[in-house]
Image: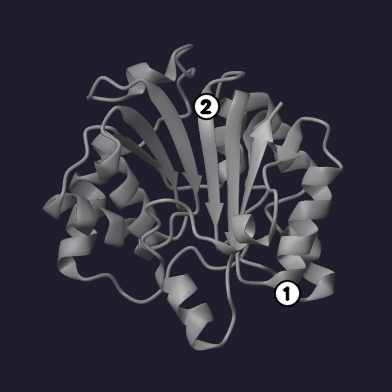
Amino acid sequence: MAAERRTNGERTRVRENFFGRSRGKTLRPLQAGLLREALPPLALDLSRAAPADLRTLFLAPVETVRLEIGFGGGEHLHLESGRHPTAGFIGVEPFVNSMAKMLVALEEGPRANLRLFGDDATLLLDWLPDASLDGIDLFYPDPWPKRKHWKRRFVNPRTLQRMARVLKPGGRFRFASDIETYVDWTLQHLRDHPAFAWEADGPADWHTPYEGWPGTRYEAKAHREGRKGAYLTFRRL
């Protein structure tokens, strides 16, 4: 469960796995306006109980539901939600400027099969019902490269247990990173978890981007700096 603290005798859920800034440079007027007007209808309200069937969260009829944690500039999430209109997508991004960029993209290309959450993903994972997701994506997360900060990495035993709970049997957890230590870290943690199996037969399986992969600005920066991405897929047993 998410961490809790008591304030005036009441329990309050607190962020467990989000560190660093939640806001960058000053937003443009359009972005600020979209955060005020366009985000509330799309935002999930965790003060209400989650529906037993997550498909009812969406304005469009959907058959499956997928989650993307930390969607950054929204390149992949916006593309995938357009490519797969019969799938519902939940996007998590606590960084305000990134959320604003996503809302600008949605002004140009609306998505009736998309909901958003602007806080710590662990809060959302704890809110979701058991076996309710068909897939979870975590692409180019903060690698926390210093060893003393590795405990801050999103992939850890607590979050893996959460993901195992909410993924349906056969659902996929996909992870991409250009940081070798984080890739090795993820492989080790998923190998040690009894609920997941790595889907790979050879190097091409993790060196090849996912089908329809649009690339991200983080990935482009890594390529400019001479780092290549690894693309891992794990199946929920």
The answer to whether residue 45 is left or right of residue 42 is right
Q: Residue at x 62, y 58 (%)?
A: 206
Q: Residue at x 23, y 61 (%)?
A: 32
Identify the residue at the far left of this view.
108
Q: Position of residue 142 (x, y in %)?
A: 61, 66
Above or below: residue 25 compared with residue 46: below
Q: Residue at x 18, y 46 (%)?
A: 37
Q: Position of residue 186 (x, y in %)?
A: 74, 54
Label 1: how many Cα within 10 Å (few below 14, some 14–19, many 20+): few
Q: Are the residues at dot 2 and dot 1 in contact (C-beta closer than 8 Å)?
A: no
What is the three-letter code of the residue carrying label 1? Pro
Residue nearest the observer in this picture, 162 or 6: 162
Identify the residue at the far right of this view.
192
- Quarter holding residue 191: top right
Which structural element holds mark 1? loop
The quadrant of the picture occupied by the N terminus is: top right
- Quarter holding residue 110: top left
The quadrant of the picture occupied by the C terminus is: top right
Q: Residue at x 18, y 56 (%)?
A: 33
Looking at the rendered structure, which numbered label has been put on residue 133?
2
Tell me the mark number nearer the camera, choosing from 2 and 1.
Answer: 2
For marks 2 and 1, give the CA distance: 30 Å
What is the three-letter code of the residue carrying label 2? Leu
Q: Position of residue 2 (x, y in %)?
A: 69, 36
Label 2: how many Cα within 10 Å (few below 14, some 14–19, many 20+): many
Looking at the rendered structure, which numbered label has been put on residue 145?
1
